[in-house]
């Protein structure tokens, strides 16, 4: 179907997809997984580990928390590794199981199929009733249904928007935005409104276009999958030639009775019988639909099921997949490096610099001093009492601004002198190690140099 634009170019008109209500073994399983993940998504911002949230992705303050571990800009390399591992996991799953992420774990699918579409079914009925309602003349009853549906959609989008923000700014900040006067949090308020509108637009109108056109992951499918990747497919060798069966007539037909149920339930509007398609989000709705038909016809199930291309073509079931093994090895190596980086991570990080433009000062009492500036960051969620010590040289520290406690998750700036008798100076430049001591142990060691004239 096409409509002409003002400029004369032909622009395809979007065909609205009325998906039939899914149901069956696979849908029940998907509901379990989806609602569990949804519950986790809702509860996670409220969970604290050692005073820190379970997950936080504060891109504004560049603070990230994963399972209660805080990652500051200094830990970016660890965070990047964490993200890389997550990506490799998704790639590995795609190589082995196709778009399993899309159908089972992607928030877009979970919200669309298990929340928004369920509400639509409740208010407007199954697909045929929805179609009829949209074509029906505008009546009070039609308006009432549409207003009710869109009001609930907006309210849920508002909740999702708040949920989304709680992962960025944390639940406490979000609570402040919600309870303080709007004038104190104009930015936060605008963000909530904008995100609400975006989510509402996505789930009420854009829908499957996110998966079929906008999301780049779907497009990556063809690169990642091979003949041995398991995905949802139609067994054409068994199903074809498709056609209606005539009673008491011997026919050469396949198992597909061309009932079109698999197309009607598809949320992206495709016909799985046309082969592997980028638009398929592996939602399993067509498997359930076809299994119901096969059951009624007393034929084996799984005319549509989890198959690899090579299986469908009649080759024996693959035992291994070289690419999957290679990805697993890469994944194991990345997890090992990630673990090592996590465990070897210091609680305190620091930057020690000689005060700009200064060299040394010879004092009247026969000592020499150098001036330094130090910035420390406490990466934990606890205050750390500390002091500075020169570790391997006989030098004294005189603080210009004395600090004794590093506040949780905060940075501290200090200035201090290193002082030593000029008589003990053996070389113009001496390497010095400064320890940041907490509980008698060096939680961070910083290197610098001390310059002084040799007498
Ligand atoms: S649901 Fe099964 S039988 Fe019906 S059209 Fe689809 S593949 Fe054929
Ligand atoms: S083809 Fe089947 S599995 Fe793929 S999106 Fe459509 S209904 Fe879901």
Image: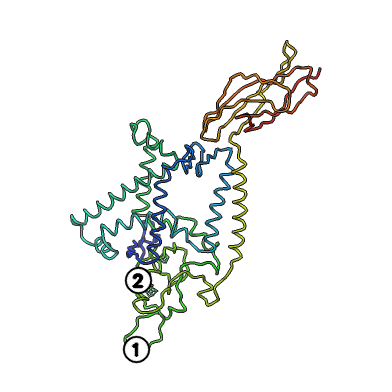
- How many numbered marks are there? 2
Q: Quadrant of residue 78?
A: top right
Camera-nearest residue between 9 and 240:
240
Identify which residue is drawn at 18% across, 57% down: 139
Residue 245, how many percent across, how many down? 35, 83
Residue at the front extreme, as displayed: 439
Q: Quadrant of residue 133?
A: bottom left
CB-based contact (under 8 Å), mark 2 and mark 1:
no
Q: Find numbered disc 1 in the image and state the secondary structure of the residue it sits on.
A: loop
Is residue 440 or residue 335 the one in the foreground? 440
**Which quadrant holds residue 297?**
bottom left
Residue 313 lies, with reference to residue 340, above or below; the image says below
> Which of the two residues, 191 or 409, is positioned nearer the viewer here?
409
Residue 10: percent from left, percent from top: 39, 61
The C terminus lies in which quarter of the figure? Answer: top right
Badge 2 element: helix
**Residue behind mark 2:** 261
Q: Position of residue 429 (x, y in %)?
A: 76, 25
Q: Earlier in the sequence, mark 2 or mark 1?
A: 1
Determine if the C-beta at disc 1 is less than 8 A from ligand 1. Answer: no
Q: Residue at x 54, y 53 (%)?
A: 87
Which image quadrant: the N terminus? bottom left
Asked if the residue at label 2 sits under 8 Å from ligand 1, the reply is yes
Residue drawn at (43%, 73%) of the image = 302
At 57% from the left and 23% from the top, the residue drawn is 403
Q: Which mark is residue 196?
A: none
Real-space CA distance between mark 2 and mark 1, rounded to the nearest whole angstrom: 24 Å
Disc 1 residue crowd, few under 14, some 14–19, many 20+, Cα 10 Å: few
Q: Position of residue 233 (x, y in %)?
A: 46, 70
Residue density around tag 2, few if under 14, some if 14–19, many if 20 or more, within 10 Å: some
The residue under label 1 is: 249
């Amino acid at each position: 179907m096409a409509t002409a634009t003002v400029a004369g170019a032909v622009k395809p008109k979007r065909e609205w997809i009325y998906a039939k209500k899914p149901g069956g073994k696979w849908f029940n399983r998907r509901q379990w997984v989806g609602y569990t993940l949804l519950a986790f998504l809702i509860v996670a911002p409220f969970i604290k580990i050692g005073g820190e949230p379970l997950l936080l992705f504060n891109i504004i303050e560049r603070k990230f928390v994963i399972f209660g571990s805080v990652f500051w800009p200094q830990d970016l390399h660890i965070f990047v590794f964490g993200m890389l591992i997550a990506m490799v996991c998704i790639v590995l799953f795609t190589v082995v199981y196709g778009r399993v992420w899309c159908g089972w774990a992607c928030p877009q699918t979970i919200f669309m199929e298990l929340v928004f579409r369920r509400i639509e079914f409740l208010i407007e009925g199954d697909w045929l009733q929805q179609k009829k309602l949209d074509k029906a003349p505008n009546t009070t009853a039609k308006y009432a249904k549409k207003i009710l549906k869109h009001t609930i959609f907006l309210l849920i989008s508002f909740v999702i928007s708040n949920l989304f923000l709680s992962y960025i700014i944390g639940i406490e900040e979000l609570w402040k935005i919600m309870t303080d006067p709007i004038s104190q949090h104009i930015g936060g308020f605008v963000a909530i409104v904008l995100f609400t509108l975006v989510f509402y637009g996505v789930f009420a109108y854009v829908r499957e276009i996110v998966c079929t056109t906008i999301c780049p992951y779907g497009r990556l499918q063809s690169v990642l999958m091979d003949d041995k990747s398991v995905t949802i497919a139609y067994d054409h060798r068994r199903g074809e030639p498709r056609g209606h069966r005539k009673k008491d007539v011997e026919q050469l037909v396949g198992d597909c009775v061309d009932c079109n149920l698999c197309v009607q339930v598809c949320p992206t509007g495709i016909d799985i019988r046309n082969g592997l398609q980028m638009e398929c989000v592996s939602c399993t709705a067509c498997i359930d639909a076809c299994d119901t038909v096969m059951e009624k016809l007393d034929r084996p199930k799984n005319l549509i099921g989890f198959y690899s291309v090579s299986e469908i073509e009649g080759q024996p079931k693959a035992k291994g997949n070289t690419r999957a093994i290679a990805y697993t090895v890469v994944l194991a190596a990345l997890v090992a490096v990630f673990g090592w980086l996590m465990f070897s991570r210091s609680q305190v990080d620091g930057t020690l610099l000689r005060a700009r433009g200064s060299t040394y000062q010879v004092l009247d009492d026969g000592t020499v001093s150098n001036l330094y500036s130090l910035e420390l960051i406490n990466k934990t969620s606890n205050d750390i009492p500390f002091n500075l010590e020169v570790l391997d040289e006989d030098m004294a520290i005189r603080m210009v601004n004395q600090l004794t406690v590093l506040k949780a998750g905060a940075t501290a700036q200090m200035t201090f002198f290193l002082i030593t008798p000029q008589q003990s100076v053996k070389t113009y430049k001496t390497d010095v190690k400064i320890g940041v001591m907490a509980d008698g142990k060096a939680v961070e060691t910083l290197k610098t140099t001390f310059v002084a004239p040799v007498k």
